[in-house]
Image: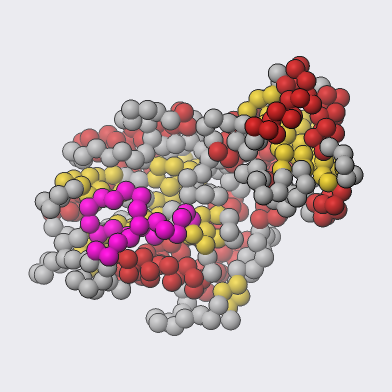
């Protein structure tokens, strides 16, 4: 049995490197019995995110207080980011800034308060006896502190900031009264600022995920037998890798991985199409580590026809065009640049190389989900520009992004090469999580 202990500590980066060496050390065909990734680093990372990133997010959003109401069976989407994932009875999580700095205070049912307090996440956990209202007690404190701006999880644009139900909000406003209800604001901007930034250790975990994702995609291409292997069988190979290594899906397993050697299918599932000479194969794939952090990587291959030793001139041009678009986006990505500007840089390359129109945004944030909270790298040619495309990139944000080239196939339909890679934004610009794909994988 191989045990890889990636528990949270100050030698985490070294452990990631060791993990990569061990995971790739097996002889061809050799299979490890099982993989144990060790204790999840999430509890400590969550605590650090609350104590360091959340106060900054509240300040950036102009919120004096943030109230999150958690409950069983229909919990707030942000619950496990604040320690409310085990809520049974209603619990009120209150984060606030005052003359003493930043404080986190929780009003918890007495039957759950002991365990919550022992997590040592929050400054105060107040046990509320059975029959009393935690929301009422939280409201009393809000009125006592006379907070001017109170963020709550109601949002028209971000599902992660829209956890407060209609009845919960109605109950809250009844207890607050007209004056304080008028001080309620959407937590949309607060959650955007908080979730869009990742800690360095989170980036290291996603780097490991990206490394494994790309490695397995290349291994999947090695098992293809043209005229025999189907797209679905390549996808099954990657499914088996995830099961063998004990990692999760980056998005719905019905569409992850998406392997397509035919015309564009968009976000889709792999089919039983047989891979043939002359095909360009797209594999869009991502994995989830510690049931938390995800990757999103695409790798492209060309199946050589009889007598070919390299891709034909037109396919090679399409590849180089898409790669050039990806690199243009990479060069445009730095703090202070808007998402729409990154998209525009990539679209200029598409235009210069006569690519057909592609509906997809150049890129998106990635982290806790494949399409995470943060700036959208799109909108420069879209009929409806997303508000998130007008947001500026900041250090600590992680993106998956493409370079596109699309053309019409002789057999009908379009084919798009979408060179998708992952980066983290630093103070100096973008940094690759893993080396990007430079050349088409050639399959004999």
Residue 269 sits inside the magenta stretch:
yes
Residue 1 x/y as whole percent = 58, 81
Kindly identify the residue that appears in the image at 28 percent across and 58 percent down: 260
Question: Where the C terminus falls, by quadrant?
Answer: bottom left
Kindly identify the residue that appears in the image at 58 percent across and 59 percent down: 291
Residue 283 x/y as whole percent = 33, 58
Asked whether, in this view, residue 278 is left or right of residue 360, the answer is left
Residue 170 x/y as whole percent = 70, 28
Kindly identify the residue that appears in the image at 18 percent across and 66 percent down: 276
Residue 412 x/y as whole percent = 15, 49
Q: Quadrant of residue 17?
A: bottom right
Residue 21 sits inside the magenta stretch:
no
Kindly identify the residue that appears in the image at 38 percent across and 70 percent down: 237
Magenta-highlighted residues: 250-273
Camera-nearest residue between 54 and 250: 250
Does 223 appear above or below 153? below
Name the colouring of the figure. secondary structure
Q: Main secondary structure of the magenta part?
A: loop
Q: Quadrant of residue 8?
A: bottom right
Q: Quadrant of residue 155?
A: top right
Asked whether, in this view, residue 395 is left or right of residue 183, the answer is left
Is residue 123 in sight in this rendering?
Answer: no
Figure label count = 0
């Amino acid at each position: 049995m191989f045990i890889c202990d990636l528990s949270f500590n100050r030698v985490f980066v070294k452990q990631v490197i060791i993990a990569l060496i061990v995971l790739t050390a097996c002889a061809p065909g050799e299979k490890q019995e099982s993989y144990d990734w060790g204790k999840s680093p999430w509890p400590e990372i969550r605590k650090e995110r609350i104590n360091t990133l959340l106060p900054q997010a509240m300040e950036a959003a102009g919120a004096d207080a943030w109230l999150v109401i958690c409950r069983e069976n229909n919990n707030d989407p942000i619950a496990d980011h604040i320690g409310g994932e085990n809520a049974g009875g209603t619990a009120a999580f209150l984060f606030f800034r005052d003359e003493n700095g930043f404080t986190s205070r929780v009003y918890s049912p007495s039957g759950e308060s002991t365990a919550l307090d022992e997590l040592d996440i929050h400054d105060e956990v107040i046990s509320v006896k059975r029959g009393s209202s935690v929301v009422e007690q939280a409201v009393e404190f809000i009125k006592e502190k006379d907070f001017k701006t109170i963020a709550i999880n109601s949002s028209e644009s971000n599902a992660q900031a829209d956890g407060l139900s209609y009845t919960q909000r109605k109950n809250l406003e009844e207890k607050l009264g007209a004056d304080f209800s008028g001080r309620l604001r959407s937590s949309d901007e607060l959650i955007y600022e908080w979730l869009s930034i990742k800690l360095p250790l989170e980036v290291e975990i996603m780097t490991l995920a990206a490394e494994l994702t790309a490695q397995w995609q290349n291994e999947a291409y090695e098992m293809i037998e043209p005229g025999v292997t189907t797209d679905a069988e390549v996808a099954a190979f990657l499914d088996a890798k995830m099961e063998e290594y004990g990692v999760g899906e980056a998005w719905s397993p019905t569409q992850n991985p998406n392997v397509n050697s035919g015309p564009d299918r968009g976000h889709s599932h792999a089919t039983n199409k047989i891979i043939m000479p002359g095909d360009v194969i797209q594999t869009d794939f991502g994995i989830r580590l510690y049931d938390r952090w995800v990757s999103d990587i695409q790798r492209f291959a060309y199946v050589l026809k009889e007598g070919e030793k390299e891709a034909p001139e037109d396919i090679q041009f399409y590849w180089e065009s898409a790669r050039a678009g990806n690199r243009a986006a990479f060069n445009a990505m730095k703090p202070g640049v808007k998402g729409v500007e990154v998209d525009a840089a990539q679209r200029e390359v598409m235009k210069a190389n006569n690519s057909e129109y592609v509906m997809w945004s150049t890129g998106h944030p990635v982290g806790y989900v494949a399409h995470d909270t943060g700036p959208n790298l799109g909108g420069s040619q879209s009929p409806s520009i997303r508000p998130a495309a007008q947001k500026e990139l900041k250090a600590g944000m992680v993106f998956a992004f493409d370079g596109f080239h699309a053309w019409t196939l002789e057999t009908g339909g379009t084919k798009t090469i979408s060179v998708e890679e992952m980066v983290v934004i630093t103070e100096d610009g973008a940094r690759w999580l893993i080396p990007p794909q430079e050349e088409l994988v050639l399959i004999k």
